[in-house]
Image (tube, rainbow, N blue to C red):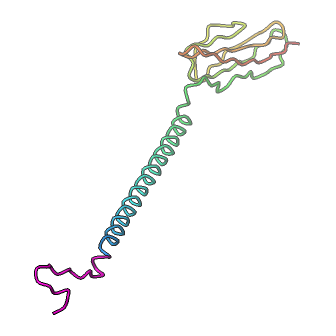
Amino acid sequence: MSLTDLPGEPEKPSSSPLKKLLPLTSLLFIGAVLYAAWTFYSRYQDSQKAQQQLQEKQQEARKKTVNEVFGNGEIRFETFEVDNGNISRGDTAHLCYGVENATSVKLDPPVEPIKPSYRHCIDIAPKTSTIYTITATDAAGHTKSLSLPVKVH
């Protein structure tokens, strides 16, 4: 009998190398799970950000197309011209205008009452050289003006 085999003392279990590795492998497993979860989460966030940027670009492209087709709501003069900018006294000329997104239009000096139109022409017969100014107003009260000289000799 050996000293370690004395009656009444329990046997000490032998410490195996597997039991020593168990806490370390548990920590490595938890670390790997956390790393995988972080990777999936960061890819998910990147995907969400890319999708949001794509939607913003598509919305901007739609807005640009709508503005090109329908205008952006600002007053826009399509035309403001006279067929002959140099006339003789007593002659007439055609003054044409076209305006978009306006609720009212005024011509100074007044020739006749005018209204918003895509294209409208009126006859003018100034007695002296005159600068005609067209002023358009939109529903929000914004105004825009253009001027056009007509020389009389």
Circle count: 0
Q: Quadrant of residue 135?
A: top right
Q: Quadrant of residue 22?
A: bottom left
In which quadrant is the C terminus drawn? Answer: top right
Figure check: 151 above or below 127: below
Q: Residue at x 11, y 83 (%)?
A: 7
Q: Residue at x 62, y 25 (%)?
A: 76
Q: Find residue 87 and report its horizontal and vertical position in percent.
A: 83, 16
Q: Residue at x 62, y 19 (%)?
A: 120
Figure check: 11 above or below 119: below
Front in this rendered view, residue 5 or 31: 5
Q: Residue at x 14, y 79 (%)?
A: 9
Taking 129 as reference, is 146 left or right? left
Q: Give, as a single range, the part of the protein colored magenta.
A: 1-20
**Residue positioned most to the bottom:** 1
Q: Find residue 60 and report its horizontal and vertical position in percent.
A: 52, 40
> Is the stretch drawn in magenta largely helix, strand or loop?
loop
Figure check: 126 above or below 59: above
**Residue positioned most to the left:** 8
* Magenta stretch contains residue 6: yes
In which quadrant is the N terminus drawn? Answer: bottom left
